[in-house]
Image (cartoon, rainbow, N blue to C red):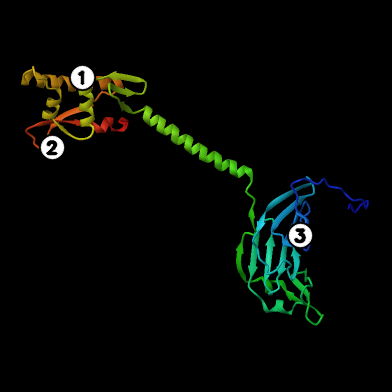
Amino acid sequence: MQQRNGKFIIYQILLDKARAVHSHLSIDTGDEFYFFGGSGLHNNGGRDSFSNNEVWSFNFQTKNWRFLGKSKANFSGSDPDSFFIIDKSIYIINALGRLYRVDVLENELTEFKINPFIYLFKNYVNPVFYKDHLYYLNKKGIVKKVAFKTLSNKILKTTAFYQKKKGYGSLLISVGFVFLCFLFIGIYMYLKVRNAIVISKNGLKYKSKFIQLDSVAISIIELVIIKEVAFSVITELVRKEHLSKIQNERNRNQYLEDINQKIKFLTGFKSNFLIISKSSFDARYKSVIFNKMDYGKIMK
């Protein structure tokens, strides 16, 4: 109702609105109205009541309801013993004489240590805060006052009053983040494979290039990238029965040279893929090792 003309303002009822409850607690901040607690009836028409744990706000400018979340606060009963308001916070006294402060705007629930003064308050009569003092009605029906800081100077703990609503926006962000992670992993794996030398049965592939090699050359490469290979093993791989020992050794050297030249052409690297060195087992003999320093990062 408008105070200036005494007329009621009719607000449109939307689907996303709070359920009707009674005995709830509320606070008006000027632009918004917040409420929580209390009891209500089930939507199915049942007569059994339920304790309301939802926290809602209504904006007087936009005329919209907003569900803030669900509260797990336990004030020892659906109805608090009494309450009073200071600024934009609601102070609740439960049936056990415990004092709480609910700051809905900041989503804070503060629990204070029990103070003996509270046991002097008459049950179910709301105290009044005025000029740093709390005026209350005692058990004998006499109005008394106590300095408010006496009741609120010892904080037991402060927690979140309600669990914030998880909307579709946060869900979409989470799904999008997971999708991007998989996308980046996929791109990384693709680039890793694309930028790697791939060995096939008839040659080597690197990026968009391909060189053809026979089965002997492929066998030499597959052996050397695993471990150091003696010259005698390479010679045995390329050996042909109708050739002499010297001819087979020349043939071996030619294979190694061809492999190095073709891989240089394939990758654009200047260093040899296969390195001939003294054997680590016996310095009198030679062996072939893989140039891991230059080619190790691009071998699949």
**Residue 200 x %, y %:** 30, 25
Label 3 or label 1, whichever comes before in sequence order = 3
- At 64% from the left and 50% from the top, the residue drawn is 165
- Residue identifier under label 1: 258
- Residue identifier under label 3: 40
- Residue identifier under label 2: 280
**Apparent side of residue 191 relative to residue 160 in the rendered image (left or right):** left
**Apparent side of residue 260 relative to residue 84 in the rendered image (left or right):** left
**Residue 178 x %, y %:** 51, 40
- 3D distance between C-alphas at marks 3 and 1: 87 Å
- 3D distance between C-alphas at marks 1 and 2: 25 Å
Question: Where does the C terminus fall, quadrant-wise?
Answer: top left
- At 76% from the left and 67% from the top, the residue drawn is 84
* Amino acid identity at mark 3: Gly
Q: Is residue 16 above or below residue 273?
A: below
Mark closer to the observer (3, 2) = 3
- At 52% from the left and 37% from the top, the residue drawn is 179
